[in-house]
Image (cartoon, rainbow, N blue to C red):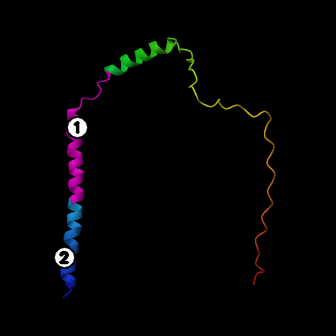
Amino acid sequence: MPPSAASRDRALRRVRLAAWGVGVGAAALTGGLSVVAAHAFKGHDGKTRLTAAVARTARAGARVKVPPPENIPAIAGQPAPLQPPPQPLAAAVPQEQAPAPPVSGGS
């Protein structure tokens, strides 16, 4: 025997309330965990930013020496490296144009 309309409505209300409860519980849990994380990990105190800015300014004036590229020997038995072609490639020959699509004569 199928459930009556009243029992179906009660079950639907219970499912809806359970979904709301899960949503509210997830939001509360997220808020609680963010408070725990905020107390567990120390944030910035504002003083380190000043020293980092001073260090960044000091580094900006310094020259950086980059080593030259290394000479890497070829691997024995490998084919010669690619070379450009002796002459530039010719322009591509245009392909035949596709036939025009059929047009309806109207009504």
Q: Are the residues flagged by discs 2 and 1 in contact, CB closer than 8 Å?
A: no
In the picture, residue 6 is in which quadrant?
A: bottom left
Comparing 84 with 10, the one in front is 84
Name the residue at 18% across, 80% down: 7
> Dot 2 corresponds to which residue?
10
What percent of the width, then of the height, locates residue 103?
77, 75
What percent of the width, then of the height, locates residue 101?
76, 71
In the picture, residue 12 is in which quadrant?
A: bottom left
Q: Is residue 89 left or right of residue 50?
A: right
What percent of the width, then of the height, locates residue 26?
23, 53
Q: Is residue 32 left or right of residue 72?
A: left
> Dot 1 corresponds to which residue?
37
Q: Which residues are magenta?
A: 22-46
Relative vertical location of residue 34 with respect to residue 13 in this rendering, above or below: above
Q: Is residue 44 magenta?
A: yes
Amino acid tagged 2: Arg
What percent of the width, then of the height, locates residue 85?
75, 34
The answer to which of marks 2 and 1 sits earlier in the sequence is: 2
- Residue reaching furthest to the front: 77
Task: State which quarter of the image contains the N terminus.
Answer: bottom left
Name the residue at 72% across, 32% down: 84
Comparing 47 with 12, the one in front is 12
Q: Is residue 106 magenta?
A: no
